[in-house]
Image (cartoon, rainbow, N blue to C red):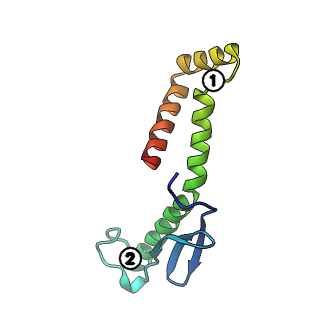
Amino acid sequence: MKHTKGNWNLKITDGLIKVRTKTRAICGTFKLREKAVTDAFLGELPPHDRAKAYNDESLANAKLIAAAPDLLKSAMELEALLTINLGNDKLNKLRDTMITQMPELKSVLLKTQTAIKKATE
């Protein structure tokens, strides 16, 4: 994988939300001050509510970005469990039957494979 190794964490300082490792910044976003909010942000809400909504969304986005390496690793592990040779013909057949007969499981596998591809290609 080509992404930055290590644990990605959030660091919130005055006016900035950052995602970083111990040694490297990954990305960041500015927190909006009420005075900086215009009608272009979040419609007709009062400025305080617009700033709060924007900042809440920025924080949620930063949390999702910080979790990305863990989510990718989990997705790859799930995909491997559902596709690799388990070393036992009966287990392989049971797994393949479950995937064939459970459309939800097949759908999750396809979504997982698509997400992995999106993150790694």
Residue 102 location, x and y as percent? 55, 21
Marks 1, 2: nearer the viewer: 1
- How many numbered marks appear? 2
Indicate the quadrant where residue 96 lies: top right
What residue sits 31% from the left and 78% below the top? 38
Type of amino acid at the residue the image marks with label 2: Pro
What residue sits 43% from the left and 46% below the top? 118
Residue lying farthest left? 40
The residue where tag 1 is placed is 85
What residue sits 52% from the left and 74% below the top? 17
Q: Front-most of 72 and 39?
A: 72
Residue 61 location, x and y as percent? 49, 62
The residue where tag 2 is placed is 46
Indicate the quadrant where residue 24 lies: bottom right
Q: On the picture, is 99 further left or further right than 38?
A: right
User: Badge 2 local density, few (<14 within 10 Å), some, or many (20+)?
Assistant: few
Q: Front-most of 114 and 37?
A: 114
Q: Front-most of 1 and 45?
A: 1
